[in-house]
Amino acid sequence: MRNVKKISFLLMMMLLLTVMAGCGSSTVAQLEDGVFSGVGQGHNAEIQTEVTVEDGKIKDIEVISHKETPVLSDSIFGELKDMMVEHNSTNIDTVSGATITSVGFRNAVRNALEQAGATDEYLEQGKKISLRFGVADEEKEYDVVVVGAGGAGMIAAIEAKSQGVNVAIIEKNPFVGGNTLVSGGEFNAPNSWVQELMGVEDSVEQYIEDTLSGGDYEGNEELVRIMAENISADGEWLRDYVEVEFIEDYLMHFGGHSVPRAIYPIGGSGIELIQKLERKVHEMEIPLYTKTKANDLIVDENNRVIGVSAENPEGNMINFYGTNGVVLTTGGFGANLEMVQKYNDVIDDRYKSTNQKGATGDGVYMAQEVGADVTDMAFVQTYPTCNPLTGHLSYVADTRFDGAILVNKGGERFVEEMDRRDVISEAILAQEDTFGYLMWDETIRNNSNMDSYLTEFENLEKYGLVVKADTIEEAAAFFEIDAETLKSTIERYNGFVEKGEDEDFQRRGNLAALKEGPYYIQQVTPAIHHTMGGLRINGDAQVISTEGEWIEGLYAAGEVTGGVHGKNRLGGNAISDLIVFGRIAGRNAAQ
Ligand code: ADP
């Protein structure tokens, strides 16, 4: 009797398993072999992929077209593709810091698989696979370890390597670039080759004066002088050694500078800079450990910094020893609202952030643990004209420098458009709906750099953040702006342009009338942009302790440091700072 029970139990189990297996195969259908195309919405435009299915499995994925930020997207697409092929699944985690691009890619692949017969169940089957992390899995020893692969970090590493030492970079993101990648990439340089070509008279002293006065004389003059004296030669190094390409006959004239002096990389963004730096890092065979987050500095018994302990995302701690030194180039803390508020209580969650996710102030925390001093921490710069959905800095909104006016929902101007970034930011937030509306006409558009930013324009248009219309009324209606008042504001402003004087807000620079349709209105909001404060360094990029001494073995450069910009950083000075001090830090750490 017992045995019969056992047998029937076994039979039942087998039956059940057969039914379950049957269920599985009916929902999770086999894919059809072939090559299938699919699209998904990325950050800037649609991402188009071609997916090859072989033996019912994902064999290969190719991105046919996209407009995502190049450096970012190359690593993200590569990363996701490898995981999808390996696991024959699209149920993969998104890449942190690049969610929209990741989702866009995933949807493009899913869309292609749907053509191959995939059902929703098929696409969602299984547990979500987390991205494989961490290349480093043991103790590593180098002469110099650089933490953070933004502009300052890659420059420091290249410089150290060119001095003949062994250097490695660790970077917590799966991609390089940091805030430098999403910046405009321009840098100020007095007496540069471009100024010479264009016949612009300038001097190191004038640049120092502009920088100090722009920062309300709170900046450290010694550091500013070092930046001003070195940047032109360092810019040539970047051009000749790293092969960054610049527009040879164009200079940006940012607010607060006496003359145009910002050299402009091709494409008008940090992409050119970062792509060429990354290429050089690879050419020089500098190990670059991405997805590796530095947590603590390692010190010896004499409190000398000899390395950094980092976590690969499998959770393993790895010690990276830098026997000569460690260079902190972890960027600022503009993506860490809590930290911003710790030092500055004016900024609250009405502000978005232009910063990439990695800008969380890690370097400051790590260095403070070993006794480092900080400076200027309360000085946080906001940027007034950002994308209200994402917080990204809007380059389309640079029409402000070409004559666009800023109005509110009532159709009235409310601030001088060329005022300081903090003043304009607060003025925008004081408006009833906390938005500003930037308005320009076709003539201003044609005098601007808009052609470099068409993708951003299309993207803004898609999300209803900019409108192009034949008449003022039509443009105003799109954002429910009071059209009658707007028309009289424009009429009054055009009168000022004719007189050559803005009687309402004393706007500086050239005034441009708004007369010729189509008209454009863009909705903008302020966001946290740059943290001027950070680690106290000396002219050798050595990190100084609260006791006023160099913490041996520790160097820092770029936005993680404080002192150069004082209360307010002038446009184009972040890159000048990171180039000069990145090189100094790399050179000194190598010795
Ligand atoms: P900078 O302009 O000073 O070069 P960026 O913002 O361009 O600064 O670059 C800083 C880089 O440092 C970013 O890529 C960021 O992800 C990286 N980073 C920040 N914190 C850490 C950390 N704890 N470990 C490794 N990398 C980090």
Image (cartoon, rainbow, N blue to C red):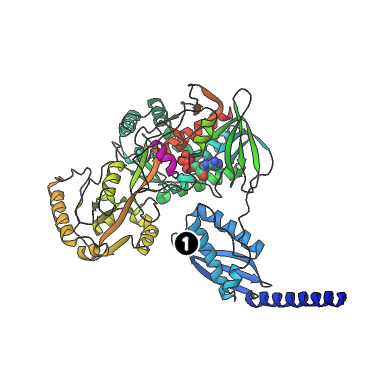
- What residue is at 47 percent from the left and 33 percent from the top? 581
Is the stretch drawn in magenta largely helix, strand or loop?
Answer: loop
Q: Position of residue 388 (x, y in %)?
A: 35, 55
- The residue nearer to you, when weighing 418 against 446, is 418
Secondary structure under badge 1? loop
Examine the image and state in which quarter residue 211 appears.
top left
Please tell me how many numbered marks the rendered image carries. 1
- What residue is at 61 percent from the left and 44 percent from the top? 289
Q: Residues within 10 Å of mark 1 (few under 14, many from 20)?
A: many
Which quadrant: the C terminus? top right
- The residue nearer to you, when weighing 57 against 591, is 57
Say what amino acid the circle numbered 1 marks. Gly
Q: Position of residue 250 (x, y in %)?
A: 35, 45
Q: Position of residue 24 (x, y in %)?
A: 67, 74
Which residue position is annotated with label 1?
Answer: 42
- What residue is at 25 percent from the left and 59 percent from the top? 442
Examine the structure image and report whether residue 385 is included in the region drawn in magenta: no
- What residue is at 53 percent from the left and 36 percent from the top? 156
Which quadrant: the N terminus? bottom right
Q: Is mark 1 within 8 Å of ligand 1?
A: no
Examine the structure image and report whether residue 344 is included in the region drawn in magenta: yes
Residue numbers of the magenta segment: 330-350
Residue 149 visible in image: no
Residue 169 visible in image: yes
